[in-house]
Structures are given as structure tokens and as C-alpha cells.
Amino acid sequence: MGRDLLATAPTGSGKTAAFVLPTLLRLEKAEARLLRNGPRALLLAPTRELASQICGEVQRLAAGRAFKVAVVSKALAATKDEAGQGVFSGYDLLVATPMRLLQALREGRVDLRRVRAVVLDEADKLFELGREGKKNAAGESLEPDKSFLGQVDEILAACTYPEVQRALFSATLPPLIQDLAGSVLRDPVSVSVGLPSNRSNYTHAAAVPESVTQELVFVGREEGKLLALRQLLKQGVLPPILVFLENKERARELYHELCYDHLRVDVMHADRSTEQRAALLEKVRAGAVGGAMQKAGLDT
């Protein structure tokens, strides 16, 4: 029906297919693709790694059809087609982090006026207020908004197609995010799989499938974290293992500490190149290495 959508479901429940398949079907029903002059669907994700993963799923689900799909990257944005036009004019569907897409938009490399559908995956992360730009004495911004919310707002403003559909998918929707979603969606249909996470009973437990076991370990002091982790590893666990940390400095420190334990360990953070991060993810998928991973900043 083309209604805006607000959807919550536990991790691992199939959210990617839930928004990719309807998006592809909607594009198939649109006018014939006689001439591509701009993307007709956007899938936004908070990190490049997640964007690449989503793109792989889109390509798998669109196999045998004529859709052209790509992840927005700095290298691709600088490419020109044979007519000298921005390369993104030749794609039906783009998957991107907000900042990378916004850079291409501000440079005039992509036209979003034909976009029929915009999907925000991991909406709770995309709508985090984050870090604001510098302001003058009057409180006016002196530089572009660096928060996901500001980036998403600017992208949505550029999608001027009258019947554009917006959909938000997330494992969790705390009260603040619900308020922000209300400013983006127009009379949305709400779908919640599993326990509802409304204002009165909001809990992260509602976002975790029953197959996942959670445990909280009290360590007393900062140094106790490393000791507790080493004890956990000695008890025997099945790799690969992901360890998330607050920032890249702590990720590096833990990586070097675990190297002394002769573990097959590597580290991922925003200072590593796209190629290095992609190679590491392949090693993790193959079970060749565990990983110490920075919690945030993977979209740069």
C-alpha cells in the first residue's frame, strides 16, 4: 500500500529480507527502466560493514533480475560513466552510510529525486543524536551536522518524490527514538515481532532472541575486565568471538594484551582501511580469527 512503516524485531529474525524483498517488488512494479537517471531506492545503515552485508543480501535476493545495486563508496562516487555523468545515475538501488551518501549528494554526484523507497536499518543507531558541529555565540551551526540524525534529515529532504515510502527497522526502539521516528514517518504502520518495547515496558531483553544466552559478570574494577575475559577463554569457548569496546584506543590495548596469550586475534577500528576491515571480516566468517572490535566509528 506504500504506507510508511516502523518495524521492530529481534536480531536474527530476518529483518533484512523483510525490507529487501518488498523494496525489490515495488521497484519491479514501477515504470519500465528504459533510462536510468538516478536511484529509485535507498537502504541506509550506520556502518559500512553492515551496508556491504545488506548489499550482498540484495544481490542474492535479486539474482536473475535486471536490478543494478551498489554500496556507496568514496571511490565509486568519483567515477564517471561514458557520458560524463555521475556513476550513481546508473543504479536502481543504493546501500550507504548516511555520511558517505550525503557527501555524494552535496557534491552533486547523486540525484535522489526519483527515490521511491527509503529504508533505515538499525534505526536506533541512525537516530542517535551523536556529536553536533561547532556553534557561534548565537548558537548557530558553523559546520555541517555530524550526527546521524542531521545526516538522515538532509538525505530525506532530498528525496522529493511525492509518494516516497519511508521504513524504519530496528531491534530496539527506546522512547527517545520513538519520538524522533515520529518526526520522520507519516502516519506509519507499526509492526512489532516478539515482546513490544513501548514506553511503559521498554527493555533490551525484548530485542534478543531466545536462542541467545546473556550473562552479566561483575569485575569490581577496570583491571578485572581483562582477568575475567582470560578466565572465560580458559573455560573453553567456541570461536569466532567478537569483543566490542568503547573506542579504538581500548580496542588496540586489548588486542596487544591478547596477543601475549598466543590467541588468533585481530583488531578492527576506524583507523584501519576498508580493505583491511573487509579482509578481517572474511577471516572471522571463516573462523580463522576472533576479533577485538571498536564499538563505534566503523562508518568512516
Image (cartoon, helix red, strand yellow):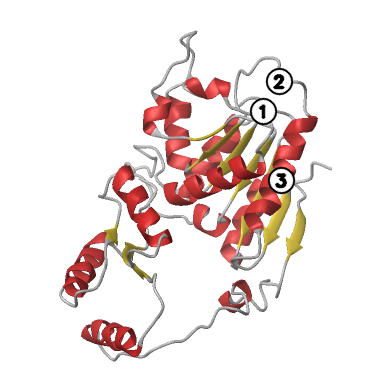
Residue 154 got which mark? none
Earlier sequence position, callout 1 versus callout 2:
2
Comparing marks 3 and 1, which lies closer to the viewer?
1
Look at label 2 and name its amino acid.
Arg
Look at label 1 and name its amino acid.
Ala
- The quadrant in which the C terminus is found is top left
Residue ID at (63%, 25%): 113
Is residue 183 something that shows in the picture?
yes
**Residue at which label 3 appears:** 21
Is residue 134 something that shows in the picture?
no
Circle 3 — which element? helix
Q: Is residue 133 left or right of residue 63?
A: left
Labelled pair 1, 2 in contact (Cβ < 8 Å): yes
**Residue at which label 1 appears:** 66
Look at label 3 and name its amino acid.
Leu
Cα separation between marks 1 and 2:
9 Å
Q: Is residue 207 left or right of residue 104?
A: right
Residue ID at (46%, 86%): 215
Circle 2 — which element? loop
The x and y percentages for residue 129 are: 46, 55
Compared with 272, 106 (above or below) is above
Compared with 34, 231 (above or below) is below
Pointer 3: residues within 10 angstroms few (<14), some, or many (20+)? few
Residue 33 got which mark? 2
The x and y percentages for residue 162 are: 74, 29
Instruction: Tell which of 157 and 40 is nearer to you.
Output: 40
- The quadrant in which the N terminus is found is top right
